[in-house]
C-alpha cells in the first residue's frame, strides 16, 4: 500500500536529479545561518561547489554539540515570524536543542508520517491509539498529524495510566497502537494480569528506543499484532526519518527528503554500502532548520539488496550509539548530565554509579551515591529526605524517574583508568 507511490518508488536518474536540486537548495538555505557560513569558509567550500551528489563529502559535519551551542535559535534559517512550531530534544547537558518548523516543514513531516503509516498497512478504517508523550517530545504530535492525515480515528492518549489505556483499546475498538517497545511489553503484561483481551488490535508501531528481533517476536505474539520499527530524531522532524515496510526487513529512509551516509565514527570517512558505522543525515527540504551532514550518533548500515516493496534505500535496525548517550524509556540521557547534577549537590560525595536495568520490560535507572557525612544526621528520615532531594534534582534535569541509593563513603568503585560509572544491564534484549 502506497501513500504517494510516485515519490516513494522514484529511482535512478530521476531520484538523483531530485536529490541534487534539493541539496543545492539546502546548501543555499543554510547560508542564512552564521554557523554554516563560517563552517563552509573554514572547509574552503561555497554553495556553487556542489555540482554532484558526491560533492556532499566536501561539506562539514554538524554535531549535537554544535546545535547545543546554537541555543536557542542559532540554527534557524528563516525569520522567527515564519517559525510556527518549536520542539526541543530531551537529554542534553544544560540547555536542550531547539528545533523550529515552518508551516511547510510541518506539512512535510505530516506527509512523511502518512507515508510511514500507510506503508505498514494502516488506513482510514483504523482506530489509532497514540501512546507517546504529547508536548516538546516529537513522538506524540508527529504520529498524531500523520495518522489524522491518513484519515484514521486518532486517540491522543499520550503516556501513563496503563489500565485506562487498556480500557480505551477495548471500549473504542482500537486496531493500532503506537508506543515505545518497552511500554508495549508493559501494556500487554498489565492486560494479561487484568485478563483483558486486546483482540481488536492488528498493527503496532514501536520506536524512540532500541529493540530487537526477539522483542518483536514477543510483542507480536502477546499483542496479536504485526509490529513495525520506527526511527527518527528531533533534529530532523522527529519520528518518521526511517520506517519499516510490510517486509519487516530494514527501515526505508525517505530518499526524497533525506540524504543518508554511513561514516566511520572515528575518522569521519564515508564507508562503502553494507558496512556498519554512524548514520549521517542531510535533510533536503527543511526550511526552518536545515542541517548539513548531521551526525546522528546512531550505528547502523545500509542493506544492499532491493526491497520487494519497490521503495528505496534501507538501513538495518539501529544497533547502538557512537557516543555515550543512553536512551531510557525513550528519553535521551547523557551520563555527563547525571554527573553534573550530582556534583552540584553538596550532600553527595564525588563517587557515584549509575545502573540501567530492564524491569518488567521498562527501563529503570538506579543511582548509587556516597553520602557526605557532614550533611547526614544518621536518622532514617534524614536519609529519605536526601534521597528525595537527589531524585528530585535528577528528575528536574532529565525528566526521568530514578531510584537513588545512598551508600557509605569509600564503598563505590574507584577507577584507575577511564572511569566506567554507567553500567547498562539491559543487554539481554539483544
Ligand atoms: O525519539 C523521535 C521518535 C519518536 C522516533 C517516536 C520514533 C518514535 P529523540 O527524542 O530526539 O527523537 O531521540 C532520537 O532516539 O537518535 C536514537 O538514538 C533513538 N531512537 C529513535 N528511534 C529508534 C529506534 C525520537 N527505532 C534518538 N531504534 C535517536 C533505536 C531509536 N533507537
Image (cartoon, helix red, strand yellow):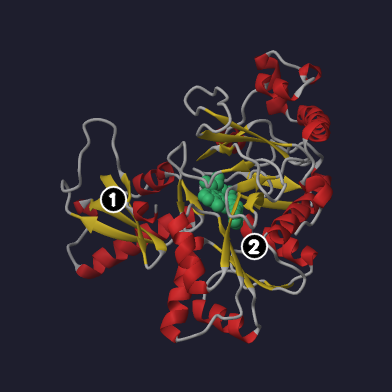
Location of mark 1 (residue): 348
Q: Residues within 10 Å of mark 1 (few under 14, many from 20)?
A: many
Q: Is residue 93 above or below residue 265?
A: below
- Badge 2 marks a residue whose secondary structure is helix
Up-down relation of residue 118 to residue 284 (above or below): below
For residue 195, say whether it is visible. Answer: yes
With 303 as the anchor, is 127 left or right in this view?
A: right
Please tell me in which quadrant of the rendered image residue 152 appears: bottom right
Rendering coords of residue 279 (x, y %)? 57, 36
Q: Which residue is mark 2?
A: 140
Q: Residue at x 70, y 24 (%)?
A: 56
From the viewer's perspective, tell me whether residue 275 is left or right of residue 37: left
Mark 2 and mark 1 lie on one chain; the one further toward the N terminus is 2
Residue 424, percent from left and from top: 34, 49
Does residue 65 sit above or below 143 in this rendering? above
Residue at screen point 23% across, 51% down:
370
The residue located at (69%, 40%) in the rendering is 73
In the rendered structure, the answer to whether residue 6 lies left or right of residue 226 reads right
Amino acid at each position: 500500500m502506497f501513500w504517494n507511490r510516485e515519490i516513494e518508488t522514484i529511482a535512478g536518474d530521476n531520484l538523483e536529479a531530485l536529490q541534487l536540486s534539493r541539496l543545492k537548495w539546502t546548501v543555499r538555505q543554510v547560508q542564512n545561518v552564521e554557523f554554516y557560513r563560517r563552517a563552509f569558509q573554514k572547509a574552503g567550500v561555497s554553495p556553487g561547489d556542489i555540482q554532484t551528489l558526491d560533492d556532499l563529502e566536501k561539506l562539514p559535519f554538524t554535531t549535537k554539540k554544535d546545535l547545543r551551542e546554537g541555543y536557542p535559535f542559532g540554527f534557524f534559517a528563516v525569520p522567527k515570524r515564519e517559525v510556527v512550531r518549536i520542539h526541543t530534544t530531551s537529554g542534553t547537558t544544560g540547555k536542550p536543542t531547539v528545533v523550529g518548523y515552518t508551516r511547510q516543514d510541518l506539512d512535510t513531516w505530516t506527509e512523511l508520517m502518512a507515508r510511514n503509516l500507510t506503508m505498514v498497512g494502516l488506513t482510514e478504517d483504523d482506530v489509532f491509539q497514540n501512546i507517546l508523550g504529547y508536548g516538546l517530545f516529537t513522538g506524540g504530535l508527529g504520529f498524531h498529524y500523520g495518522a489524522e492525515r491518513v484519515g484514521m480515528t486518532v486517540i491522543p492518549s499520550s503516556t501513563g495510566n496503563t489500565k485506562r489505556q487498556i480500557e480505551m483499546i477495548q471500549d473504542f475498538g482500537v486496531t493500532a497502537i503506537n508506543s515505545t517497545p518497552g511500554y508495549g511489553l508493559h501494556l500487554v503484561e498489565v492486560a494479561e494480569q487484568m485478563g483483558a483481551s486486546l483482540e481488536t488490535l492488528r498493527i503496532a508501531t514501536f520506536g524512540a528506543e532500541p529493540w530487537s528481533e526477539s522483542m518483536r517476536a514477543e510483542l507480536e505474539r502477546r499483542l496479536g499484532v504485526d509490529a513495525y520499527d520506527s526511527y527518527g530524531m528531533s533534529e530532523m522532524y522527529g519520528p518518521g526519518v526511517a520506517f519499516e515496510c510490510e517486509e519487516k526487513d530494514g527501515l526505508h529512509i525517505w530518499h526524497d527528503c533525506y540524504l543518508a551516509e554511513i561514516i566511520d565514527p572515528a575518522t569521519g570517512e564515508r564507508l562503502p554500502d553494507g558496512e556498519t558505522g554512524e548514520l549521517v543525515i542531510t535533510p533536503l527540504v527543511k526550511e526552518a532548520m536545515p542541517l548539513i551532514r548531521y551526525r546522528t550518533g546512531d550505528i547502523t548500515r545500509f542493506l544492499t539488496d532491493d526491497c520487494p516493496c519497490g521503495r528505496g534505500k534501507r538501513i538495518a535496525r539501529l544497533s547502538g550509539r557512537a557516543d555515550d548517550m543512553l536512551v531510557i524509556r525513550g528519553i535521551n540521557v547523557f551520563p555527563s548530565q547525571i554527573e553534573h547534577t550530582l556534583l552540584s549537590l553538596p550532600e553527595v560525595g564525588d563517587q557515584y554509579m549509575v545502573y540501567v536495568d530492564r524491569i518488567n520490560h521498562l527501563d529503570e535507572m538506579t543511582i548509587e551515591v556516597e553520602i557526605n557525612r557532614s550533611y547526614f544526621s544518621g536518622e532514617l528520615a534524614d536519609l529519605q529526605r536526601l534521597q528525595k532531594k537527589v531524585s528530585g534534582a535528577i528528575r528536574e534535569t532529565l525528566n526521568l524517574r530514578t531510584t537513588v541509593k545512598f551508600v557509605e563513603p569509600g564503598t563505590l568503585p574507584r577507577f584507575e583508568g577511564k572511569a566506567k560509572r554507567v553500567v547498562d544491564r539491559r543487554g539481554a534484549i539483544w
